[in-house]
Image (cartoon, helix red, strand yellow):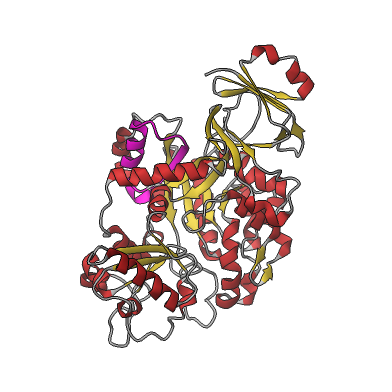
């Protein structure tokens, strides 16, 4: 790897100032500073690149994605643009017609079930489209789905209805399933979908890595299912794992961790490392399974607390895993789920003492402001997805009591309180575009208009959330900065994010992306 000097750039620094030049030797930044300072060092470098005023950021972190699952969905039925049941019917009919006599499953995602107006259904809605071909389509939040009767039968769920509550499998008047399945029931069907080969999964992931590079993403935090490990091994063996993956396994897999560590020992930990465990504490707002302190509007329930959260096992599991040095990241949507997760983390401090544990709450979409000081006192990180506000702003006004509305995505106030936040997308719930995420955090523009503008986040803090904070939140202390001694991950943008109109930020792409000082993407290639 030759030495490289980059000059005449606009290189972002976390204090809102800019350098003009930087150098890379081996895989690390060797120099940052002004053009005159770079001129004195030209003789030390093999290559000189004139950035011609382009803006350069550290490599971006997406701090929460479902990598393998999302990559596969890019190859399946995308229902993101569906706005009515009739449109869904046409899309499925078209897919079935293309397959002719095939009885393979139709699998789709990103459907907004709330837009289909299924409140008064009298039969399984997907059966009215096709009752012979198994159809499974997940809601955009991945906490509920639609499945026709044959899909319920082929997955085995029809034989296990008694194992799930009516919240998880709503029933018709004749006690048959409506076709809407939530939380554990949805997960059961998902787990029993037709298996995809490791080769096909790896191919989908490799294709998606290219898309991430085109946005300047060099690192991700992946919610990893155990069978995904074979995909990362396959890619590594083929020399195609060229993005940094911080892996978080389901907490229920903690007993098997030694086997998993042994299975990935030959993957270069520069590009893949198991960092900790993911816990689901509640569901989602869209599926009315987020766990709140008050009931949903016109409902006699306040959401769903997951089985493991209700089991009473989490305090001991947390204590044990924290004691072994594993990082814990907990999905908590509703304000009650956030409150109870904070209590679990606070108990860790009492039992295992203060240490650099970097415990995280994933999403934390609704936070009681009385809980703000608790985050800072226990050094708890929030892993947020501001772009989800496009869905949530309208939903909260329809589904939550008015006093809870202003608790939605109140990250601006949190940042002003000194609480550490990192950004991600939760892909495939939304597209991977980091600049759309940043634009939403800055503008808070939604269909109902600008939503609680007091929670807007300034551009500099948004970039920190995608760089320095993302690195910190995943124990990557040698990443996230363009600074001497740090690993040389960086992105050259095709537009200047600091001068472009706010409403155009989402159009930004990478012109070039580098990992360890090596180019992994260029619009010119």
Which of 432 and 89 lies nearest the eye of the viewer? 89
Which of 425 and 495 lies nearest the eye of the viewer? 495
Indicate yes or no whether the magenta region holds residue 240.
yes
Indicate yes or no whether the magenta region holds residue 120.
no
Give the residue at x 28% y 51%: 196
Q: Position of residue 181 (x, y in %)?
A: 35, 71
Q: Residue furthest right?
A: 36
Magenta region, residue range: 225-253
Give the residue at x 73% y 62%: 454
Asked which quadrant contains residue 172, the reply is: bottom left
Which of 22 and 144 lies nearest the eye of the viewer? 22
219 up-or-down from 169: above or below: above
In screen coordinates, is 309 left or right of 490?
left
Which of 53 and 24 lies nearest the eye of the viewer? 53
Give the residue at x 65% y 49%: 419
- Residue 138 in sight in this render: yes
13 up-or-down from 301: above or below: above
Asked which quadrant contains residue 217, the reply is: top right
In screen coordinates, is 21 left or right of 65?
right
Q: Position of residue 211 (x, y in %)?
A: 49, 45
- Residue 322 in sight in this render: no
Q: Position of residue 8 (x, y in %)?
A: 74, 28
Q: Position of residue 507 (x, y in %)?
A: 63, 52
Number of numbered discs visible in the structure rendering: 0
């Amino acid at each position: 790897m030759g030495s490289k000097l980059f000059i005449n750039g606009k290189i972002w620094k976390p204090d809102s100032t800019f350098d003009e030049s930087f150098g890379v030797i081996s895989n690390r930044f060797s120099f940052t500073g002004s053009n005159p300072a770079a001129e004195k060092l030209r003789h030390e470098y093999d290559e000189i690149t004139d950035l011609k005023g382009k803006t350069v950021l550290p490599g971006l972190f997406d701090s929460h994605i479902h990598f393998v699952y999302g990559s596969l969905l890019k190859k399946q039925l995308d229902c993101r643009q569906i706005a009515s049941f009739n449109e869904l019917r046409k899309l499925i009919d078209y897919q079935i017609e293309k397959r002719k006599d095939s009885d393979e499953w139709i699998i789709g995602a990103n459907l907004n079930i709330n837009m289909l107006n299924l409140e008064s259904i009298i039969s399984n809605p997907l059966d009215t489209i096709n009752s012979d071909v198994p159809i499974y389509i997940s809601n955009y939040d991945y906490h509920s789905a639609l499945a026709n009767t044959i899909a319920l039968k082929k997955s085995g769920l029809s034989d296990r209805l008694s194992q799930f509550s009516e919240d998880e499998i709503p029933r018709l008047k004749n006690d048959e399933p409506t076709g809407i399945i939530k939380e554990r029931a949805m997960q059961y069907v998902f787990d029993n979908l037709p298996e995809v080969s490791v080769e096909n999964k790896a191919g989908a992931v490799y294709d998606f890595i290219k898309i991430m590079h085109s946005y300047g993403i060099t690192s991700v935090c992946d919610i990893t299912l155990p069978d995904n490990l074979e995909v990362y091994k396959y890619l590594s063996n083929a020399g195609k794992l060229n993005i940094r993956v911080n892996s978080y396994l389901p907490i229920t897999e903690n007993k098997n961790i030694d086997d998993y560590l042994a299975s990935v020992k030959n993957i270069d930990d520069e590009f893949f490392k198991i960092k900790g465990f993911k816990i689901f504490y509640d569901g989602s707002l869209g599926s009315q399974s987020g766990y709140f302190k008050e009931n949903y509007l016109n409902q006699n329930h306040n959401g769903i607390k997951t089985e493991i959260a209700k089991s009473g096992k989490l305090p001991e599991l947390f204590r044990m895993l924290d004691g072994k040095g594993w990082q814990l990241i907990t999905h908590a949507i509703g304000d009650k789920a956030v409150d109870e997760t904070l209590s679990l983390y606070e108990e860790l401090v009492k039992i295992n003492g203060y240490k650099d544990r970097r415990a995280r709450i994933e999403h934390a979409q609704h936070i009681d402001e009385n809980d703000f000081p608790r985050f800072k006192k226990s050094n708890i990180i929030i892993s947020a997805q501001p772009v989800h506000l496009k869905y949530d702003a309208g939903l909260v006004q329809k589904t939550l009591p008015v006093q809870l509305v202003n608790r939605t995505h109140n990250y601006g106030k949190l940042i002003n309180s000194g609480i550490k936040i990192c950004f991600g997308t939760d892909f495939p719930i939304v597209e991977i575009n980091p600049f759309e995420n940043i634009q939403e955090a800055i503008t808070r523009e939604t269909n109902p208009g600008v939503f609680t503008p007091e929670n807007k986040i300034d551009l500099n803090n948004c970039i920190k959330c995608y760089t320095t904070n993302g690195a910190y939140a995943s124990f990557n202390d040698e990443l996230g900065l363009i600074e001497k001694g740090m690993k040389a991950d960086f992105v050259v943008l095709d537009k200047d994010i600091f001068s472009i109109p706010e409403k155009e930020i989402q159009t930004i792409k990478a012109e070039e992306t580098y990992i360890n000082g090596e180019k992994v993407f260029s619009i010119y290639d």
